[in-house]
Image (cartoon, rainbow, N blue to C red):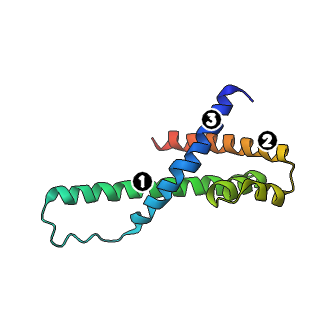
Amino acid sequence: MNDKEKEIIKQVKRFFYKDYPKYKQLSVFADLSSVNFDGVKSSSNINHQEQRMVKAIEAKNIVEMVNTIIDNICDSRYKTILKKCYLQNVPKWQVENELMYSHSTFYKLQNEALLLFAELFNKIIEVTI
């Protein structure tokens, strides 16, 4: 594994541990069907509310994109590792035991799964920009 791949793996892990939970939490607010502005006369408050709603919708889109990418990975081993370790926060040793892989095989597959996820994520981002 080269230095570039190691950096990509580090960035994807950072995304799943730090960014993804924030997007997931924020995405909950995207489903609010209406916002009540009773008693709020300031146009700046309405503008801030709109900005929050836009951020929530963007977060929901990212969460859905992540789920879609993982759901459509053909290799079931990669899919299981990504879903359980990074979306469901199942301890890695548990997933390793469930898949019945040695420690070294599991971490090799995990790294391959993270690199594949990064590749697919970046391709989708390129298409949507």
Looking at marks 3 and 1 on the same chain, the residue that comes earlier in the sequence is marked by 3
- Read off the residue under disc 1: 58
In the picture shown, does residue 127 fall above or below 87? above
Report if residue 72 is visible in the image.
no
> Does dot 3 land on a helix, a strand or a loop?
helix
Looking at marks 1 and 2 on the same chain, the residue that comes earlier in the sequence is marked by 1
Looking at marks 2 and 3 on the same chain, the residue that comes earlier in the sequence is marked by 3
Q: Are the residues flagged by discs 2 and 3 in contact, CB closer than 8 Å?
A: no
Whole-number angstrom distance, CA of label 3 to CA of label 1: 23 Å
The amino acid type of the residue labelled 2 equals Lys
Whole-number angstrom distance, CA of label 1 to CA of label 2: 32 Å
Crowd rating for badge 3 (residues with CA inside 10 Å; few <14, some 14–19, many 20+): some
In the picture shown, does residue 82 fall above or below 4? below
Position of residue 98 measured from the top left corner of the image (x, y, whole percent): 82, 61
- The residue shown at (64%, 61%) is 88
The amino acid type of the residue labelled 1 equals Glu
Number of the label disc, if any, that sits on residue 8: 3
Q: Are the residues flagged by discs 1 and 2 in contact, CB closer than 8 Å?
A: no
